Amino acid sequence: MIKTCLFALITILATSGSASAFDLTSPDLANGQELKADQVGKGANCSGGNLSPALVWANPPAGTKSFVVTLFDPDANNGKGFWHWGAFDIPAGVTSLKAGAGSADGKLMPANAVQGKSGSGVQGFIGACPPAGPAHHYIFTVKALKIAKLGLNSTATAEEISAKADQEKLGEATLTGLHAKP
């Protein structure tokens, strides 16, 4: 009896690891590490490149019909957070975004993908630019959706994009970068 239970437990553990989890990575950013100067904002007391990092995702849930990508800083505004980016209607066949895809002109975004506005009303990606003090966490999230079109347009804020995506989400993967102003 004990051998049978032990064998069953080992079998469950061995097979549970065979399915790969939905994952988000970047050649430009290691999870939990400092953002590069390219991902730091430009202007408003920051002198970075204001360039969205390349993002790569793998193993989305079965039935995924589109993706949403967001960037959120939960440490900004006294813990209320700040939305730096929101892109949606990224086709299911797309598994990456190039560095700079978040530029306001959207030239590097996949066909039919739409970028909304940041928390400051700017179209596209806004790089990190916290006040002096402890490091802020910059959470890149890709959400796999069960619908092909989110039903929003480019006037939607990243916060609205994220909230609507949560209603249609099959799964999500995150990657967190850190940045502190010296």
Image: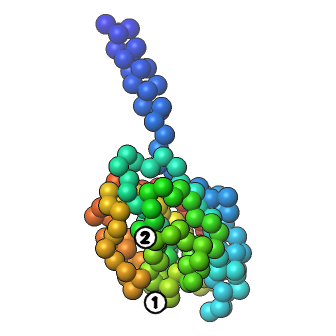
148 and 21: which is toward the camera:
148
Q: x and y percent of residue 168 in the render?
A: 30, 61
> Looking at the picture, does residue 135 appear above or below residue 147?
below
Q: CA distance from mark 1 to mark 2?
A: 16 Å
Residue type at mark 2? Phe
Q: Are marks 1 and 2 in contact (CB under 8 Å)?
A: no
Res 47 seen here:
yes
Packing grade of label 2 (10 A; few <14, some 14-19, many >=20) is: many
> Looking at the picture, does residue 18 appear above or below residue 145?
above
Packing grade of label 1 (10 A; few <14, some 14-19, many >=20) is: some
Q: Which residue is mark 1?
A: 121
Q: Secondary structure at mark 2?
A: strand
Residue projecting furthest to the bottom: 44
Q: Secondary structure at mark 1?
A: loop
Q: Which residue is mark 2?
A: 88
Q: Quadrant of the N terminus?
A: top left
> Looking at the picture, does residue 24 appear above or below residue 162?
above
Q: Residue at x 71, y 86 (%)?
A: 47
Q: Quadrant of the C terminus?
A: bottom right
Q: x and y percent of residue 27 in the render?
A: 67, 58
Q: Which mark is residue 78?
A: none
The answer to which of marks 1 and 2 sits earlier in the sequence is 2
Q: Residue at x 45, y 65 (%)?
A: 90
102 and 173: which is toward the camera:
102
Residue type at mark 1? Gly
Q: x and y percent of residue 7 in the render?
A: 40, 14
Q: Residue at x 38, y 8 (%)?
A: 3
